[in-house]
Image (spheres, rainbow, N blue to C red):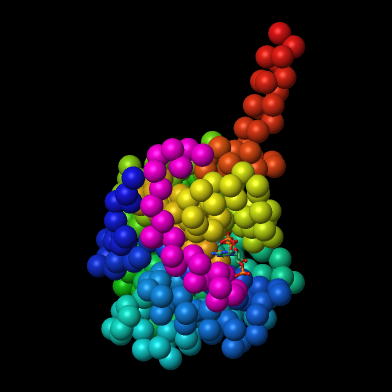
Amino acid sequence: MTMEADVLKIPGTEFHVRRVGLGAMPLSLAGRPDADQAHAVIRRAVELGITLVDTADVYALDDDDIGHNERLVAGVLKEMGAGFGGTPGDPQVVVATKGGMRRPGGRWVPDGHPEHLRAAAEATLRRLGVERLDLHQFHTPDPKVPFLESVGALADLRDRGLIAALGLSNVSPDQLEAARAVVPIASVQNRLSPWDLGSGPVPMVERCRKLGVLFLPYAPLGGSGKVAQVLSHPPLRQVAEGVGSTPARLILAWHLHRHPHVVPIPGASRIRSVESSAGAGAVRLEPAQLQALERAFRSLPGAPGLVRRWVRKLRGRIR
Ligand SMILES: NC(=O)c1ccc[n+]([C@@H]2O[C@H](COP(=O)([O-])OP(=O)(O)OC[C@H]3O[C@@H](n4cnc5c(N)ncnc54)[C@H](OP(=O)(O)O)[C@@H]3O)[C@@H](O)[C@H]2O)c1
């Protein structure tokens, strides 16, 4: 089985991105690496041909540290002579940012008020040193603000030419539909990890495919804090050995094979992780290997459906 394309176009733009991106979040949260290591991780990702870097204004320790990740990403890309934000360069990279949250005391708090979204996008433009944001994503709907009020504010920024492509994150299919009635939506960034097979995220991925919306799975390897549990899961390791791949590469290859319109954005704070992930596009999987892998995902402790299947099995025995 082959993947449909190695490169995808961001809808409504002329940007083309390779199908594995970099999630820059772990470079700026608590436990982050030192500046030299953080620079080296981003630099290596770009050297290896990664052309989409996912960041956010709130990838930082707290409100006093807002913009840490955006500054880091912009600094390295500029050092390398890369182009982004409407500025030409080589290579050309898409910086996917987000606005719509705050970090008081290090907590994650949605803020979808139009004035916050405007001020946050303008601050991001200044931090990145560009006149237009390549892909700006509404970080998460704010229950205190009508969703379309937030979307309307971002649509205005797009109309003013400050945003090339608008994306949404952590949205439901209904919210996606509602937003699309107001403004073209280029991408959705929702969680899609090996734990999520057979649950809510999968229909959303399909919905995006039908609508021609790019899908950026976050936590593609299981999410920070849970990755080690996924990568050491014996059934998964067994499939990886059979394919001649590492478990992480195999999972990323699964994303690429299963959904032709996704760009997974594995987070990384080590060069080794980036080097391993960048090789995922070369892994070719046969249908039987994909099925074996999905059986392994479904057997992860806590995977949706696992309890249901146990109950069914038990009932079958009782009957
Ligand atoms: N929109 C949202 O609400 C939202 C929420 C969460 C995340 N995100 C975005 O999505 C990105 C990915 O999510 P995530 O970082 O939470 O989870 P993830 O990508 O599933 O896991 C990240 C962890 O996986 C490890 N890793 C990455 N590649 C590896 C490889 N090839 N081999 C072995 N280990 C590997 C990294 O370890 P090392 O750190 O040791 O390199 C990292 O800590 C984030 O960076 C962020 O940009 C968005």
Asked if 250 appears above or below 61 in the picture, the reply is: above
Task: Name the one closer to the observer, 285 or 261.
Answer: 285
Would you identify the image quadrant in which residue 39 lies?
A: bottom right
Task: Name the foreground residue: 237 vs 148.
Answer: 237
In the depicted structure, whether residue 203 falls above or below residue 245: above
Q: Is residue 61 left or right of residue 255?
A: right
Residue pictured at 48% horizontal, 50% vertical: 243
Q: What residue occupies the far left of the structure in this picture?
A: 14
Q: Is residue 256 magenta?
A: no
Relative side of 225 to 15, left or right: right
Q: Is residue 8 left or right of residue 192?
A: left
* Ligand 1 placement by image quarter: bottom right
Closest to the observer, 209 or 256: 256
Q: Is residue 186 left or right of residue 315?
A: left
Residue 96, position as x, y percentages in the image: 44, 69
Q: Is residue 91 visible?
A: yes
Residue farthest along the bottom direction in this orientation? 79
Count of all numbered marks drawn on residues in the image: 0
Residue 118 versus residue 310 in the image, above or below: below
**Residue at the (30%, 85%) spot, across then down:** 89
Task: Answer with the quarter of the image where residue 84 lies.
Answer: bottom left
The N terminus sits in image quarter: top left
- Counting from the top left corner in percent of width and height, residue 166 is at 38, 62
Q: What residue is at 74 percent from the left and 72 percent from the top?
A: 105
Q: Which of the image's four quarters has the C terminus?
A: top right
What is the chief secondary structure element of the magenta stretch? Answer: helix
On the image, the x and y values in percent for residue 188 come to: 44, 54
State the residue at coordinates (35%, 65%).
18
Residues in magenta?
268-292
Q: Is residue 286 magenta?
A: yes
Q: Is residue 117 visible?
A: no
